[in-house]
Amino acid sequence: MEFLWIGFASFIALVFLKLVSGNRGSRSKSPPSPPGLPILGHLHLLGKLPHQSLQKLSQRHGGLMLVKLGVHNTLVPSTTEAARELLKTQDHVFSSRPRTIAGENFGYGGAGMVWAAYGDHWRSVRKLCTLELLTAKRVEMFQQVRKAEMSMLLKEIQSSQMSSVELTSKLLDLTFNFMTRMVMNRSYSSGSSAERELAVRFKDLITEAFTVAGSNTLADFFPYLGWMDGQAKKICAIHKQLDEYLAKQIVEHRQQPGTNRDFLDMMLARKDLSDTSIKALCLDMIAAGTDTAAVTVEWALAELVNNPAMMLQVQEELKEVVGENRALDETDLPKLTFLQAIVKETLRLHPPGPLSIPHQSIQACELEGYVIPAGTHALVNVYAIARDPRWWDEPLKFDPERFLRQPDIDVRGQSFELLPFGSGRRSCPGILLGTTTVQFVLGSLLHAFDWAAPDGKELDMAEKFGLSVPRASPLRLVPCTRLNPQAYI
């Protein structure tokens, strides 16, 4: 009898040791994680600026870190090496999107492109955007639209004689007009008062959508608590109003069909797109093209005001290439190498999306030697990668000349130390439009005016988090004309 008890005890001990060693082995095959809390996981560690909090955590726990955000396991690549493996080596695996409240509403349940799950529909709309809507030819086709809107802003600033200009709202108005004229031939600055009022409300809704889409939504982390999530209800309310505006545009375009006069006409001419997909694609393009471009120009101006020698250097380049008797034209941009370097450096220090739109793995894979299950989410910390001292000298310093010394580093997703537009299958298809817009707007403002802080002090560079990350306070600067009067006509 004693022998049986000894045998049974030995068996239990062996099973226990097997379980313990097995758990240790499985833990070792998962990426490192910070200590978390039951149920919440690591949500409490995100803080008000999640990209900065995750950067600090990665410095302790590694360039490929696993965090639990409510019920979801989420990878956070924070180094060039980890980003390259996820976005290039395993690009086909992490090519889908998780379902989120923002994606279900602003992405019309995946009917557009940005929030669509990986599959035939995504491939179809991605092809439409890259081969028809956002080609170099299409971007060039709307060059005069951007020039006309830019000219109106320059004249407004030049003739207003204001002691200071609040640029945050003016830049949003400008880029919103760029996009609405391209997408649906509508402008915030023209039309009847009723139409302008409607356009203003639409622009405000776009801004609200960007803010709430980047905030922590309870229902995304704990789907079973969606019924009590006020943020989710707010997102649904914003979507309802956006949908009404977009539906109205579709009706009006069908009543007055054009000949490829804007993106909406092009989409309506196709027989393979539902109205839902068309509305989703319109919202994708207007939202992405409005907020990110305006925020990037705003950050660039703020950095240059804090670095007046660099502002003078780029203005000398503009004077040499463009002169003082006319406004900047987009055809001048290829000759403005220092302006291009300033835009790259701004995208490095202040990426419009410091955390990528979330990816989701469609199957199990191995990443940097770790086993990653299917359905794992991933947020690439673009902000941390672009401030990695292993790749960047003095990474916190605004130094555009680094890109004159290293001109081969680009923003198109091939240089994994700089990923403002992502990389791989889910990279932004509007890179050409985005960079052209930022260079043209920034160059025009710097060519036409000197800019200074109202009080002469250095500007506060604090951030405010959203889907994009603007300055915490609106940018107000004092302009001083630089050109001959005929250049503002």
Image: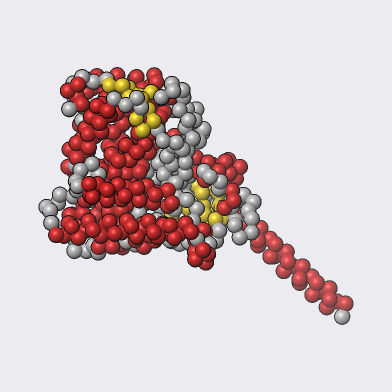
Quarter-of-image position of residue 114: bottom left
Depth order, front residue of 222/422: 222
User: At 22% from the left edge and 23% from the top edge, which residue is drawn?
Assistant: 322
Residue 269 placement (x, y as % from top left): 16, 59
User: At 44% from the left edge and 60% from the top edge, which residue is drawn?
Assistant: 233
* Residue at the front extreme of this rendering: 193
Quarter-of-image position of residue 139: top left
User: At 20% from the left edge and 43% from the top edge, which residue is drawn?
Assistant: 190
Residue 132 in sight here:
no
Residue 112 placement (x, y as % from top left): 31, 58
Quarter holding the C terminus is top left
Depth order, front residue of 424/216: 216
Left/right of residue 181 with respect to residue 17 in the rendered view: left
Residue 330 placement (x, y as % from top left): 22, 33
Number of marks in picture: 0
Left/right of residue 242 with respect to residue 258 in the rendered view: right
Up-down: is 95 above or below 406?
A: below
User: At 20% from the left edge and 30% from the top edge, which residue is drawn?
Assistant: 329
Depth order, front residue of 100/454: 454
Left/right of residue 440 with respect to residue 356 in the rendered view: left
Residue 268 placement (x, y as % from top left): 19, 59
Residue 311 in sight here:
yes
Quarter holding the N terminus is bottom right
